[in-house]
Image (spheres, rainbow, N blue to C red):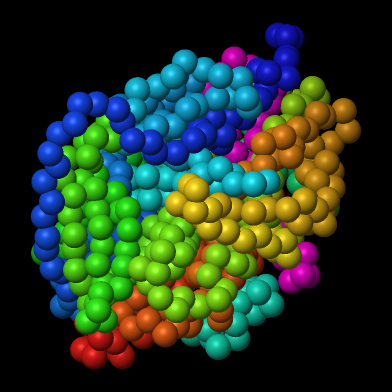
Amino acid sequence: MPALSRRSVLAGAAAATGLSVVGGPTALAGPARRIPVTREEQRVVVIGSGFGGGVTALRFAQAGVPVLVLERGIRWPSGPNAETFPRPTSPDERMSWVGSTPSLFGVPVLPLKPYTGLLEQVPGNGMDIMCAAGVGGGSLVYQGMTLQPTAEVFNANFPEQLDYARMDRIHYPRVAKMLRLRTAPDELINSKTYKASRVFARNVEQAGYPLSKIPMPIDWDYALRELRGEMKPSYTNGDCAFGVNNGGKNSIDVTYLAEAEATGRVTVATQHNVTDVAMRSDGGWEVHVDRIHTDGTVLEKKIITTKALVMAAGTAGTTRLLMRSAAKDQIPDMPDGLGTNWGSNGDRIYTWTNFADDFGAPQGGPVVYGSLEWDDPARANTVIQASLPPLPDLRTTMLVGYGVSQGRGEFVYDSAKDDAVLQWPGNPDAELAKHIDERVSRVAGRGAVRLDTTSLVPNTWHPLGGASMGTVCDLAGRVRGHRGLYVLDGALMPGNSAACNPSMTIAALAERATDELIANDVDVVF
């Protein structure tokens, strides 16, 4: 058996989960030059192109409303044998957002050239947040678990006024249709490189837990074509942690946004990094934007005015922008709850080293099976198995858990940094973490070695809250007391997503909200 070191396991985990990215955007040094400043007016501006922004752009466009979507990152086109996305085992500048300094659990690696790459790790006190950049937002790099919570778990964590029955009948099905959800076919699961998935499924059932195939926004025919040798491996060797080069993943850029742009009413402006938002004296909104080169150099400064501004820059992006504006009185009288009610979704990421069964290498991915323990709404949680990227056979794979957590943090504005910084005191998710650890231990089995990487490097890929419904916004994302200002992304969520990956619920809430805004706000506010 090959030697197994703690460092090699951690490095594999980091490559699979993106924990190798730290830092944030920094100004690039260079000779002084004159940067042009331009002004323009738009009817609706949406900041961000992920699940919330993509839904918003499409539904407004279908209602006849022109929309400008501002995205700080670039487009990432994929297709058979493409090399668009970086590979986890050979990281390059495409992996990290401008100015990031990558490391592997504190072990430095070679510096990367500044680039408008896929991931930014936003540091906090006690917890870091993983953020995506690019057209499609988090849908580019998420594993793809697309889960709808049950009515019982949803109603225990969200306001009843959302009307789960209506969302179940209308809004969740819309998302499922747009993302073309499918579970992995048995022909793929029974193939050589999906042994880890089969071992996980067997162990879950032996431990007495429920087992499900996980709905994924994936055309699995692409993976079957890989098995037939018709294209280079991407799914079938787990080489998809930072995006799927071969295509077949129905991310927001190729679903909602592609359909939105096809209407002719939506413009997606890439490499447009929003620096400030402000309220105008006439009640409209002003957005300050840097149009940047792929190395981060500012090419142009834009001042965009609009009557309707939708914040969909992700939980960290939206909350920090609004808090900076509030602290500097660019947006006066923001609700007191801004920055609070933030949750990690209870994320736990494990490596599972198994000496009883060789998982094999490479491992097919990204996700096939999960165990949904949702009978008790107060303790509802999900555990899934995910592939490692193509590495030497370490007899190791990944386990991921998340669930209903009561732990809450808050953002606090730091005037010295001119930024809002997450405060996550102690370990407020400890009770959920203990329960997930017990489940993971039983699934892993006796003699297995599991390593909770989240306890070593506290971070979350599922940040939620900061401008939550019921405190900062109403249920349609209207910021209270601020006509024409909306939040339609993970920041709107009440600190958790009812034991699910939050993507489907963020999109469903945006579907619900845009129905209401089109009916009641478009002709009056816009």
Q: Position of residue 71 (x, y in %)?
A: 28, 52
Q: Which residue is painted at 78% across and 33% down in the image?
A: 450
Provide the major secondary structure of the magenta segment.
Answer: loop
Q: Position of residue 195 (x, y in %)?
A: 63, 31
Residue 447: quadrant of the picture: top right
Residue 70 located left or right of residue 326:
left
Q: Is residue 45 above or below residue 470?
A: above
Q: Position of residue 490 (x, y in %)?
A: 49, 63
Q: Residue furthest top?
A: 2
Q: Which residue is painted at 65% across and 74% down in the image?
A: 157
Q: Position of residue 498 (x, y in %)?
A: 64, 67
Q: Which residues are magenta?
A: 374-399
Q: Quadrant of the C terminus?
A: bottom left
Residue nearer the viewer, 328 or 219: 328
Q: Quadrant of the N terminus?
A: top right
Q: Is residue 333 above or below residue 55?
A: below
Residue 316 located left or right of residue 347:
left
Q: Which residue is painted at 45% across and 83% down in the image?
A: 480
Q: Residue furthest right?
A: 446
Q: Is residue 390 magenta?
A: yes
Residue 362: quadrant of the picture: top right
Residue 277: in sight, yes or no?
yes
